[in-house]
Amino acid sequence: MALVKILSANLFAGASFQKLEAGVVYDVDDAIAEKWLAQGKAEKTSEKKGEKLAFEVATPPAPVSADSSALQTQLDAALAEVQGLKDAAETTATAHAEALDAEQQRANAAEAALAEATKKAK
């Protein structure tokens, strides 16, 4: 561990991005101290005490199993509803396609009848 005095007014460190104040002495890991010294953000000091700066890594919380079963039930119900809506949409699309085909055939028959009637009228 090394004692360093912060020179930079805009230096953040740690998992929570704690802002380090300029002029304050911190006790940090040697590798980090060397990096800050090389970048001119800090200077080495021989003061007796410094604020201990710990770099922590947060671990994710344990999953909550009591709530997950209720959520899974809601998810399953929502997925079943989505599947039902998909099926209804496909059925409706098929019915519309069949109705369009029937209308197209009726229109073709009407055009043919009109053409036949026009020929006979001449």
Image (cartoon, grey):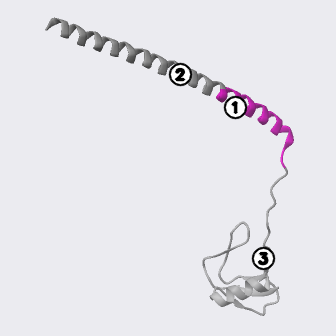
Q: Which of marks 3 and 1 is in front?
A: 1
Disc 3 marks which residue? 53
Q: Are marks 1 and 2 in contact (CB under 8 Å)?
A: no
Q: Residue at x 84, y 44 (%)?
A: 64
Classify mark 1: residues with Cα within 10 Å, few (<14), some (14-19) or many (20+): few
72 drawn magenta? yes
Residue 10 to residue 107: above or below: below
- Label 2 environment density (alpha carbons within 10 Å; few <14, some 14–19, many ≥20): few
In primary-sequence order, the first of circles 1 and 2 is 1
Range shown magenta: 63-83
Mark 2 or mark 3: whose residue is earlier in sequence: 3
Mark 1 sits on what residue? 79
In this view, 117 is above or below 25:
above
Residue 94 is labelled as 2
The image shows residue 18 at horizontal and vertical percentages of 70, 70
> Which residue corresponds to the image point at 79% horizontal and 66% vertical from the top-left?
57
Please give left or right for residue 112 compared with residue 38 in the image: left
Where is residue 49 shown, x and y percent of the image? 81, 85
